[in-house]
Image (cartoon, helix red, strand yellow):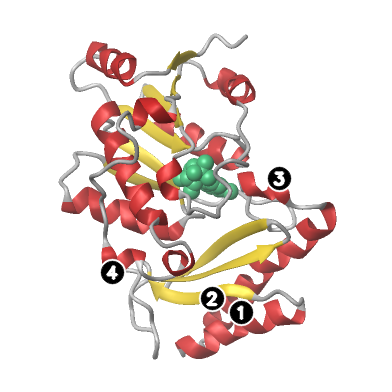
Amino acid sequence: MSSIVCLETLDAMMTYRDQLLPGQNVALVPTMGSLHQGHLALVEEAKRLAPEVIVSIFVNPLQFGPHEDFEKYPRDLARDLRLLESYRPLSVFAPSVSEMYPQGPSRTVITLPSMTNVMCGLGRPGHFDGVATVVCKLFNVVRPSVALFGKKDAQQLAIIRQLTRDLNFPVEIVGVPTVREPSGLALSSRNQYLTPVEKDRAAFLYQALLAGQKRFEGGERNAEKLVEEVADVLREHSIEPEYVSLVDANTLVPLEEELGTSRAILALAARIGKARLIDNVVLEP
Ligand code: AMP
């Protein structure tokens, strides 16, 4: 049994939050559980930034499409709590679906159309509305001063930064670098769906992005050519991507001509076996 404080209701979470000292820094690390080293990198950074760290574990039905893996998504709270043990003191907020959505799916939905109708938003309609909505709920319940998100989910991070500004949440958003396997494959709870052979293939996603990044560093500024470079490497390995996109890092507006002076994100999604995987690299001008 774990000795970590695990809060399972909104009331318990809010009461716990009320008892903290006024002005105390509180860091929130939102997750869907099935924790791996990528999540733990967020927790480590959170511990550096705040004396009070709250990890939320909630598989949010609102961000899954009707034919997606909500039912199958790996869940093992006891294992997650064991993994978090060495980071004590730390609290976990792990509400049930009925606790978070007592009236069924939330009728209020937070949406940022220009940022959700690109990249993953095209293949996963409604996904980022679900993410944005649950993150707003978590911000209101946990009232963190800082919240940490992985740069692996670059679109999610940009959307959360934007909604935090738009809705005036008094929260600092911190992005944490992607943790990878030695092969370069970004850690993901969904890697569990891969066979060993598929896992080897999945490593080419990052290799393809690195090829694009290398071309950029070699001076290429034409967006189409950079995207093609990535797509070529994927094709060489018979990987058909759902998309390869080059977008402005802050606004997610697709870049279609010569790259300017703002940071860009070169991102892709592809299905390998039963897993839909995403990854990205940043192109710094
Ligand atoms: P998830 O449980 O997949 O919703 O992820 C929870 C948080 O962990 C999100 O902010 C993700 O971006 C982050 N995350 C997931 N995988 C990684 C990784 N490999 N490296 C860094 N952060 C990650």
Of circles 1 and 3, the one toward us is 3
Disc 2 residue type (three-letter)? Val
Disc 1 residue type (three-letter)? Val
Confirm or deny contact between disc 3 and disc 2 (CB under 8 A).
no
According to the image, label 3 marks what residue? 192
Q: CA distance from mark 1 to mark 3?
A: 25 Å
Name above or below for residue 148 compared with residue 11: below
Q: Is residue 143 visible?
A: no
| Disc 4 within 8 angstroms of ligand 1 (CB) | no
According to the image, label 4 marks what residue? 114
Q: Residues within 10 Å of mark 2 (few under 14, many from 20)?
A: many
Assign a secondary structure to mark 2.
Answer: strand
Q: CA distance from mark 2 to mark 4?
A: 18 Å
Q: CA distance from mark 3 to mark 2?
A: 23 Å
Assign a secondary structure to mark 4.
Answer: helix
Quadrant where the C terminus sits is bottom left
Image point (62%, 67%), residue name: 270
Q: CA distance from mark 3 to mark 4?
A: 32 Å
According to the image, label 2 marks what residue? 244
Confirm or deny contact between disc 1 and disc 4 (CB under 8 A).
no
Identify the mark at residue 230; answer none if there is no mark: 1
Disc 4 residue type (three-letter)? Ser
Nearest to N terminus: mark 1 or mark 3 = 3
Closest to the observer: 47 or 188?
188
